[in-house]
Image: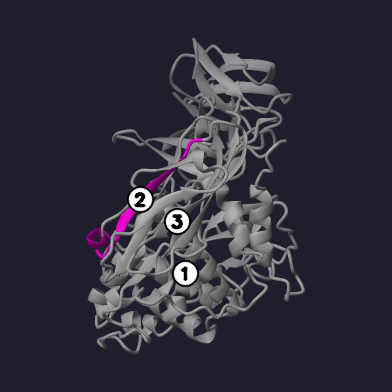
């Protein structure tokens, strides 16, 4: 008889749908905030950073929709039961599909340079589902209040020029709906505290210091929103669900007055968390019934997640064991941890590995027991083994929306590939300076760069990613940034680009496009070539240099320097 399999995807869906059946009334875990008690100002913020930063990381970026089904779905008592709870749009989208949504870093990842190796990149405390159009419109703009006519507005998200005194020098800000302003304020309080160790690339709202980190205008705005829009049941529910996944919490939801101790009316006063007890043995993490979710893993590959074990006044060494029908698919690096390590402020970490040997869904249970006579705690281990992905080559398209400081990179989506995300490699060729490159993650088949230097040249290529496997890099697309009113304009009819190839210059455009009446001039205005008709991949036999290309179906000339 075939063994009955645990339905991993069904459980994730049910967990998300039923997470909000009962209003959350769980108490803050005993001992969780004891390390910050009695501290004030910068010392308090650093103590919170040490408490929050070392948390259990979620399994992977591509598995975020499964976590969102626990944290961001309307509960049964709401008339929108079963829909995504999107704080960026009011479009009804249902949680049985993630189509039309993005994984949104509410605190923009570009602000720390976009690194995917920091825990901030996959921290559920600031990751939310967002409708794609709203996500694109808000870009990486700072929070603020919009003045005058907005450039984007959908009833929930408003984007436009900031009111006087806001923006920190940014020309555009993102203003959420009133019912979510406190949510975003407390999210930002968490981020500048948990990640005060990061170096900020964009400093509209933050400065590179440990305290206060937030700029003066940002403090005023966020405290205003925090006070006007108090903690909601939605936030309480979400805080508990995130805690079950990451074993850390947003302290500004647990203790709203904490923001006043750091930035507001209670600066200089010592913070004493209510209900904290001293001296009793307490296991703070892991949390009973939390889940380590490994997501989809390629069969015979190893996927490892670290679990934090931390407590207060523990005297007996906790033991770790595995149980369940699929326990053979999982392994622990140790069978016990010392009480001394558990009692450290940062606790200790146990690596749990999922290495499936067969296709299918797998589950097991990690039991933490034998510590000071307390009840054992059980943690669910969930994973699904799949075949190794096949990723085909990607074709990058010419950039659109080219201005002096921005452009949008485009590429064709592989027709039959399942893709978790794309990696865009951008290379910048500044005048009289060393060439440099960076990588950005894109959800859709486009990515906008809005921090370019006028008059410089850039290029990009694209790879797709699925379960840690990557496609080969696409073709390279070059972009010349406009240098002023006399510079060559962008192509708005047929998007044409170019790249160096062989003995000349190759023209690139979408497959099937045709451009007629092509004329190539040098910078002295002399006609170099006339071509009646070109298609994608046409090779212009010209020597390296600077040229201007005109054509019937181009609304503005194309400038070329190679």
Q: Is residue 344 magenta?
A: yes
Which secondary structure, mark 1? helix
Residue at image point 66% right, 66% down: 85
Q: Is residue 132 magenta?
A: no
Residue at the spot of label 1: 187
Quadrant of the rendering where the N terminus is positioned? top right
Q: CA gap, disc 2 to disc 1?
A: 28 Å
CB under 8 Å between discs 1 and 3: no
**N-term-proximal mark, 2 vs 1:** 1
Q: CA gap, disc 1 to disc 3?
A: 32 Å
**Which image quarter: residue 169?**
bottom left
Residue at the spot of label 2: 350
Local packing at callout 3 (Cα closer than 10 Å; few below 14, some 14-19, many 20+) is: some
**Which image quarter: residue 509?**
top right
**N-term-proximal mark, 3 vs 2:** 2
Visible residue check, residue 261: yes
**N-term-proximal mark, 1 vs 3:** 1
Q: Position of residue 161 (x, y in %)?
A: 54, 68
Visible residue check, residue 195: no
Q: Is residue 326 above or below residue 107?
A: above
Q: Position of residue 82 (x, y in %)?
A: 73, 64
Residue at image point 49% right, 57% down: 379
Q: Which mark is residue 367?
A: 3
Q: Left of 67 or right of it: where is 370?
A: left
User: Mark 1 or mark 3: which is in front?
Assistant: 3
Which secondary structure, mark 2? strand
Q: Position of residue 104 (x, y in %)?
A: 55, 56
Residue at image point 51% right, 26% down: 473
Frontmost residue, 192 versus 466 = 466
Q: CA gap, disc 3 to disc 2?
A: 13 Å
Quadrant of the rendering where the C terminus is positioned? top left
Q: What range of the chain is rendered magenta?
A: 339-355
């Amino acid at each position: 008889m075939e063994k009955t399999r645990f339905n991993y995807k069904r459980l994730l869906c049910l967990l998300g749908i039923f997470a909000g059946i009962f209003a959350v009334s769980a108490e803050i875990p005993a001992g969780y905030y004891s390390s910050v008690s009695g501290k004030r100002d910068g010392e308090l913020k650093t103590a919170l950073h040490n408490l929050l930063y070392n948390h259990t990381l979620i399994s992977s970026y591509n598995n975020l929709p499964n976590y969102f089904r626990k944290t961001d779905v309307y509960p049964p008592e709401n008339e929108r039961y079963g829909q995504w709870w999107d704080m960026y749009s009011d479009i009804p989208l249902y949680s049985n599909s993630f189509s039309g949504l993005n994984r949104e870093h509410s605190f923009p990842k570009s602000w720390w340079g976009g690194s995917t190796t920091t825990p901030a990149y996959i921290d559920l405390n600031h990751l939310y589902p967002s409708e794609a159009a709203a996500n694109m419109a808000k870009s990486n703009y700072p929070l603020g209040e919009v003045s005058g006519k907005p450039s984007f507005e959908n009833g929930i998200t408003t984007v436009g020029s900031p009111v006087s005194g806001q923006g920190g020098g940014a020309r555009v800000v993102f203003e959420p709906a009133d019912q979510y302003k406190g949510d975003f304020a407390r999210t930002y309080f968490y981020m500048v505290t948990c990640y005060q160790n990061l170096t900020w690339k964009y400093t509209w709202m933050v400065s590179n210091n440990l305290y206060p980190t937030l700029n003066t205008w940002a403090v005023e705005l966020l405290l205003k929103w925090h006070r006007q829009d108090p903690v909601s049941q939605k936030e309480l529910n979400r805080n508990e669900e995130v805690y079950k996944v990451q074993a850390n919490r947003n302290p500004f939801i647990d203790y709203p007055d904490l923001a006043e101790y750091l930035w507001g009316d209670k600066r200089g006063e010592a913070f004493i968390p209510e209900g904290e007890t001293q001296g009793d043995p307490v296991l703070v993490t892991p949390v009973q019934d939390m889940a380590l979710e490994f997501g989809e893993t390629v069969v015979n590959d190893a996927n490892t997640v670290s679990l934090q074990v931390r407590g207060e006044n523990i005297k007996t060494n906790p033991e770790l064991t595995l149980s369940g029908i699929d326990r053979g698919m999982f392994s622990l690096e140790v069978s016990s941890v010392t009480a001394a390590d558990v009692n450290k402020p940062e606790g200790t970490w146990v690596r749990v590995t999922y290495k499936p040997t067969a296709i299918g869904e797998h589950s097991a249970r990690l039991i933490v027991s034998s510590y000071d006579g307390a009840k054992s705690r059980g943690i669910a281990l969930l994973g699904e083994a799949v075949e190794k992905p096949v990723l085909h080559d990607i074709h990058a398209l010419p950039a659109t929306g080219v201005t002096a400081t921005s452009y949008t990179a485009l590429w064709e989506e592989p027709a039959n590939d399942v893709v978790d995300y794309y990696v865009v490699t951008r290379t910048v060729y500044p005048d009289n300076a060393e060439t440099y490159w960076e990588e950005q993650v894109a959800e859709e088949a486009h990515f906008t760069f809005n921090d370019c230097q006028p008059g410089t040249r850039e290029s990009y290529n694209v790879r797709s990613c699925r379960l840690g496997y990557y496609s080969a890099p696409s073709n390279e697309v070059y972009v010349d940034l406009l240098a002023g009113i006399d510079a060559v304009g962008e192509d708005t009819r047929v998007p044409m680009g170019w790249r160096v190839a062989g003995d000349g210059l190759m023209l690139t455009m979408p497959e099937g496009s045709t451009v007629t009446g092509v004329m190539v001039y040098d910078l002295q205005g002399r006609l170099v070539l006339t071509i009646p008709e070109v298609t994608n991949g046409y090779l212009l036999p010209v020597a390296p240099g600077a040229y201007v290309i005109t054509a019937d179906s181009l609304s503005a000339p194309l400038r070329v320097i190679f």
